Image (tube, helix red, strand yellow):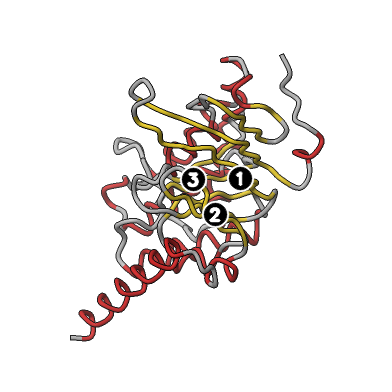
Amino acid sequence: MNNKAPESVEVPFEVRIDRVYKSFQEGREQVLKGVSLDLPRGKLTYILGSSGAGKSVLLKHILGLLSPDRGHVWVSGQNVSELSRSELTQFRLRFGMLFQNSALFDDMTVFENVAFPLVEHTEMPRSKIRTQVESTLNLLGMKGGYDKFPSELSGGMRKRVGLARAIIREPSILLYDEPTTGLDPITRRTVDELIDQLKRELKLTSIVISHDIPSALLLADHIAFLDQGRILFSGTPEEFRQSPHPVIQSFIDAERRFVELFQDQGAR
């Protein structure tokens, strides 16, 4: 079994997706249709697309939660679909992930939520766990309130706690699943600032699954656009903004009209 990536995968790409196809319902529902995409190491990539475009399915392939019907996914020099079950368990520990709703444990305090990955996956002494949890929360702007429960936190604070838990084990790849969906403008701005802070300070390979064009244009180093299971675009934010593709321009125009409508309503 060959888990070694080709030489070209090693540098400069952290993730290489090579002609990946995926269907469900015995082939009747084709979700990914020959997706090829390189995600640069140490950079922030936004994968944009409308609901149902296949973004979450693509993310699950990167994590090894799904295997392609055809094609390959290489992550950090390993062919994900060729990893054994035990190898996959270790492989996934290199990821940190912020879920759309933060996915905090309701019956755990802030401290317990952030400490959970260290308690579960390391033999770290309790004193060192406390130090690392406090240091990570401080990095994200939380100086106290560690004994509070998620129900006592604002939306922005829940995102901070979710991010702290995602980075507590110092992952090499950080994943964001629709981090700003359903948020009010103030919390949305807070999340954007946190993503930008971690991009600058940790310099991780970061992948954001989203349909938030303003955030992508503001923060991304690299943008990919997925539509009906195919990659329509891969390049810089400025190249994305200027893309002549009608689907991409329609997507940008729809987002612009939504923002203008929201601003008009807020001004009344």
The amino acid marked with disc number 3 is Arg
Lateral position of residue 100 relative to residue 75, left or right: left
Mark 3 → mark 1, Cα distance in angstroms = 10 Å
* Residue at mark 2: 224
Q: Residue at x 25, y 77 (%)?
A: 261
Task: Indicate the secondary structure of the residue bearing disc 3.
Answer: strand
- 1 and 2 marks in contact (CB < 8 Å): yes
- The answer to which image quadrant residue 184 occupies is bottom left
Q: Is residue 80 above or below residue 196?
A: above
Residue type highlighted by circle 2: Ala
Which residue bears the numbered disc 3?
230
Q: What distance separates the C-alpha of mark 1 from that of mark 2?
A: 8 Å
Which quadrant holds the N terminus?
Answer: top right
Q: Quadrant of residue 243?
A: bottom right
| Amino acid on which disc 1 is placed | Leu
- Nearest the viewer among 118 and 98 is 98
The quarter of the picture where residue 190 lies is bottom left
Point out which mark residue 37 bears: 1
Residue 60 % position (x, y): 48, 34
* Residue furthest right as drawn: 7
